[in-house]
Image (tube, rainbow, N blue to C red):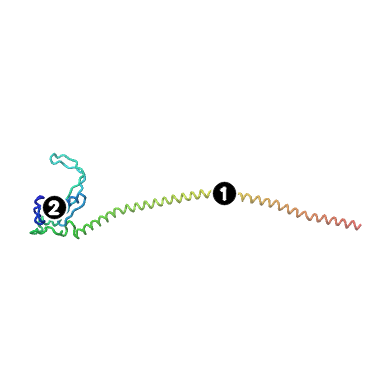
């Protein structure tokens, strides 16, 4: 069946050949534009139209058998729905008369029933768990490296701070020790001067009674002179 025969087949249902031709053109145009834009056109129970990208590859020329390089390209692809497949295989009877052959997609069709959705979800969950298990050792190693790097940097900073503090405190310590040594040197000198001044004071104190003795002698002489 070509396009003209398709139009003739649906002309009676659409009220004339002109209307059927316009309907067929509109449907095909909408499908082509959507697939070219990268969208997926899915008709429940019938099938889906989608765009598939093919990478660059090598192929053989069927006439010469020569190996030929094929460039990267995009091609349209049609996948029949489960309802369409069942009708073609004969597992489902085709309705008679003018009824629609494919109304709803049965369970397990391309749109996916509950069972297929659950299976897909289970597969995704298992893949995520496997990826997480593989990534866990790498994450632990990275975390350990970060911790060790932080410890090393912290040790370096503490040692640098201690060295800087020691350098700053060194002049102050030297000045304090110098003051202590000068104080120690000055203390014996003060003691020596104190010792020298102390005996001098004592000698002066001892000389004072001698003056008193001379005074007594003079008074004795005067008394003897008077007696005579």
Quarter of the picture containing the C terminus is bottom right
The disc placed on residue 22 is: 2
The foreground one among 96 and 208 is 96
Q: Earlier in the sequence, mark 1 or mark 2?
A: 2
Give the percent coordinates (x, y) of residue 142.
Answer: 34, 51
The disc placed on residue 18 is: none
What secondary structure is marked by label 1?
A: helix
Give the percent coordinates (x, y) of residue 130.
Answer: 27, 55
Residue pictured at 63% horizontal, 50% vertical: 186
**Count of all numbered marks drawn on residues in the image:** 2
The image quadrant of residue 212 is bottom right
The disc placed on residue 175 is: 1
The foreground one among 219 and 107 is 107
What secondary structure is marked by label 2?
A: helix
Give the percent coordinates (x, y) of residue 39.
Answer: 21, 52
Query: In the displayed structure, does residue 26 sit left or right of residue 128?
Result: left
**Mark 2 closeness class: few <14, some 14–19, many ≥20 residues within 10 Å:** few
Callout 1–callout 2 Cβ contact below 8 Å? no
Alpha-carbon distance for marks 1 and 2? 107 Å
Single out the residue that lies furthest toward the left: 97
Residue pictured at 24% horizontal, 56% vertical: 124
The nearer-to-camera label among 1 and 2 is 2
Query: In the displayed structure, does residue 185 sit left or right of residue 4?
Result: right
**Mark 1 closeness class: few <14, some 14–19, many ≥20 residues within 10 Å:** few
Single out the residue that lies furthest toward the bottom: 114
Give the percent coordinates (x, y) of residue 144.
Answer: 36, 52
The foreground one among 48 and 227 is 48
């Amino acid at each position: 069946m070509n396009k003209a025969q398709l139009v003739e087949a649906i002309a009676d249902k659409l009220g004339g050949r002109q209307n059927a031709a316009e309907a067929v053109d509109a449907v095909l145009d909408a499908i082509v534009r959507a697939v070219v834009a990268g969208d997926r056109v899915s008709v429940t129970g019938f099938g889906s139209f989608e765009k598939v990208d093919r990478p660059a590859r090598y192929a053989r020329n069927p006439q010469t058998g020569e190996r030929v390089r094929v460039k990267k390209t995009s091609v349209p692809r049609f996948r029949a729905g489960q309802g369409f497949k069942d009708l073609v295989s004969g597992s489902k009877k085709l309705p008679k008369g003018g009824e629609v052959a494919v109304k709803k997609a049965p369970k397990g069709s391309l749109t996916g029933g509950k069972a297929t959705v659950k299976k897909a979800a289970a597969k995704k969950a298992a893949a995520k768990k496997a990826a997480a298990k593989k990534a866990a050792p790498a994450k632990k190693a990275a975390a350990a490296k970060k911790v060790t790097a932080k410890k090393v940097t912290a040790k370096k900073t503490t040692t640098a701070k201690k060295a800087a503090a020691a350098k700053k405190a060194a002049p102050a310590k030297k000045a304090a020790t110098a003051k202590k040594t000068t104080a120690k040197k000055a203390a014996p000198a003060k003691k020596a001067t104190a010792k020298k001044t102390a005996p001098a004071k004592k000698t002066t104190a001892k000389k004072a009674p001698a003056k008193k003795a001379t005074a007594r002698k003079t008074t004795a002489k005067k008394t003897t002179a008077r007696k005579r």
